[in-house]
Amino acid sequence: MGDRWHVEVDRSLCIGSAQCVHTAPDGFHLDTARQSHPTAPETDAHERILAAAENCPVEAIMITLLGSGEPVFPPEE
């Protein structure tokens, strides 16, 4: 069994670029205000979700390991 992640979008940072939706269409959607939301805040670890976080122009997507809360993205400095 692989890792499970908690995915969160900081909507105070989100600018609605929709990069996450284009990168991981199953993982994110935009609401009517063009703010991103994870489709499943608790999900199996997936390369596309990580790529969406890495490609977010304002780094509004945070991913942590479910259970431990250990950061996946952004990585700790």
Image (cartoon, rainbow, N blue to C red):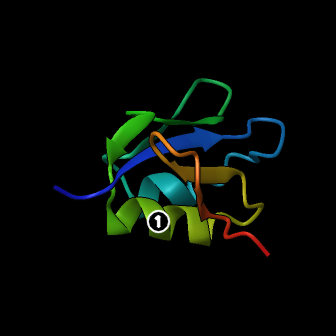
Identify the residue shown where x is 68% and y is 46%: 16
Q: Is residue 49 above or below residue 44?
A: below
Height in image: 9 above or below 20? Answer: above
**Extreme-right residue of the structure:** 12
The residue depicted at 57 percent of the width and 62 percent of the height is 53
**In this rendering, would 70 be left or right of 26?**
right
Q: Residue furthest top?
A: 32
Image quarter in which the N terminus is found: bottom left
Q: Residues within 10 Å of mark 1 (few under 14, many from 20)?
A: many
Q: Position of residue 60 (x, y in %)?
A: 72, 51
Indicate left or right for 15 with 65 as reference.
right
In the current view of this chain or complex, which residue is farthest to the bottom?
77
Q: Is residue 52 left or right of residue 13?
A: left
Q: Residue furthest front?
A: 68
| Position in image of residue 22 (x %, y %) | 43, 59
Give residue 49's quadrant in the image.
bottom left
| Quarter containing the C terminus | bottom right
Question: What residue is rendered at 64% in x and 35% in y?
Answer: 34
Three-letter code for the amino acid on which mark 1 is drawn: Leu
Task: Name the residue tied to disc 1.
Answer: 50
Q: Residue at the location (36% across, 65% down)?
A: 48
Name the spot of residue 30 as percent of width and height, x first: 54, 35
Q: Secondary structure at mark 1?
A: helix
Depth check: 1 or 21 in front?
A: 1
Would you identify the image quadrant in which residue 72 lies? bottom right
Find residue 57 and report its horizontal and vertical position in percent.
72, 66
Q: How many marks?
A: 1
